[in-house]
Amino acid sequence: MNRREFLRRALTAAVGVCTGSSLFARPLLANPAVGGVGPYGPLQAPDANGLQLPMGFRSRVIATAREVVRGTSFVWHDAPDGGAVFRVEAGRGFPSGYIYVSNSERSGNGGVGAIRFDWRGNILDAYSICQNTNRNCAGGATPWGTWLSCEETDDGSVYECDPTGVAAQIPRPALGTFRHEAAAADPVKRRIYLTEDQSDGLLYRFTPDVWGDLSSGRLEAAEVAADGTTTWAPIPNPNPSGGDAPTREQLPSAAKFRGGEGVVYSKGHVYFTTKGDNRVWDYDLAGQTTRVLYDDDTDPASQITGVDNIGATRSGDLLVAEDPGNLEIVLLTPDRIAAPLVRLAEGGRGTETTGPAMDPTGRRLYFSSQRGGPSQDGITYEVEGPFRRVSA
């Protein structure tokens, strides 16, 4: 037995055996992605910010934990995690532009920070859009322009937040009480998909009674057959309390996933990651099937390990953040090539990459090193370069 297989078996034993599903059978590996050379070529030597980037790309630091964001009076939060970018129109004395929001995965005092930019990438303002919450891990953007911030605790909730900071945060108990990780909105079929950071977590979907209003609706969990066929069953009690069974235990037939992490909707598919087995999954909404898009066991290069947050670009490329892996953001292309896009230099060891999100122009990528920076409490970057608009 080689070292790699030994570690995999040890991890499987640690997280337990997934029951109620044959999800992990090899037939679900549908032409999986493998490591290779990406569309931007190899990474270059570390730049002045300690980032390795492809030729033609450059980086800058936009915020550092416990320091004032340049040009504002706002102190950036610790432990930056999931993030997203929102297009905004002119208002409040600012020109039009966009906003990057970032969760704070602090225990007992999490929340969400926001940085507003003009179209040239100049910082206009920074402020809080969510406070007094706990371990805000990842989340997801809604088509109506709000941010769903997810608490990664056993009694965690989802908070709907206004990126502009005008409206107050709103708890959304209809989306369930459990160890929330991330959320993704399907604007076509009008549903919200949710991952659960548990070794036997479920994949959920929420169908609002009225699209655009998350105050009420139906919460369901995925059931996946051996051939990948996926159906959905209602959760009896989305908000258990007292002696009630935890949400993930209320539906024995639900598929159990080994540590749900990021989730994103892109072009009729819901992609999500699981950290216990280093996989990227593909739920095809049209075919109603769930397949493994990437598994490091089937990739000779093991390009993606420690899978975590996931984002998408307009070209259909996926952005997979690592915790810790090689401390990279890996590009997973539509032609199933996994290639590093950004790598933190050796000084970033002990941290993880988080919150990858593209600006509306498609020219800038934002992300964080959760425990990087001078205080090792987090630092947030911008990477600008010739990102492609369409896949080859």
Image: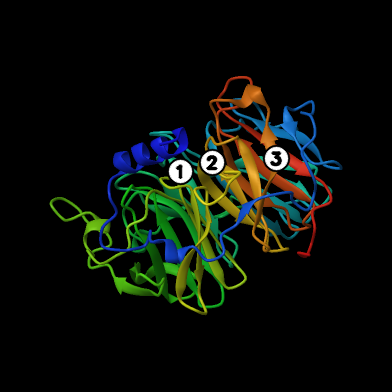
Which-is-in-front pick, marks 3 and 2? Answer: 3
Which label number is shown at residue 81?
Answer: 2
From where the camera sits, is residue 376 visible?
A: yes
**Residue at disc 3, secondary structure:** strand
For the residues labelled 3 and 2, say whether their Cβ atoms are less than 8 Å apart.
no
- Answer with left or right where residue 134 lies relative to residue 186: left
From where the camera sits, is residue 373 visible?
A: no
The location of residue 236, given as percent across then percent down, is 23, 68
Which-is-in-front pick, marks 1 and 3? Answer: 3
- Answer with left or right where residue 267 lies relative to residue 201: right
In the rendered image, which quarter contains the C terminus? bottom right
**Residue at disc 2, secondary structure:** strand
Query: In front: 316, or 392?
Result: 392
| Sooner in the amino-acid sequence: mark 2 or mark 1 | 2
* Circle 3 Cα neighbour tier, 10 Å, few/some/many (<14 / 14–19 / ≥20): many
Q: Residue at label 1?
A: 136
Q: What amino acid does circle 2 point to?
A: Asp
Cα gap from disc 2 to disc 1, whole angstroms: 8 Å
Cα gap from disc 3 to disc 2, whole angstroms: 16 Å
The location of residue 153, given as percent across then percent down, is 34, 43
- Answer with left or right where residue 283 lies relative to residue 215: right
The location of residue 303, given as percent across then percent down, is 60, 44
- Which corner quadrant of the image does residue 233 belong to? bottom left
For the residues labelled 2 and 1, say whether their Cβ atoms are less than 8 Å apart.
yes
| Sooner in the amino-acid sequence: mark 3 or mark 2 | 2
In the rendered image, which quarter contains the N terminus? top left
Query: In front: 285, or 33?
Result: 33
Q: What amino acid does circle 1 point to?
A: Asn
Q: Residue at x 79, y 29 (%)?
A: 45
* Circle 2 Cα neighbour tier, 10 Å, few/some/many (<14 / 14–19 / ≥20): many
Q: Residue at label 3?
A: 342
Q: Eyeballing the image, is 110 above or below 89?
A: above
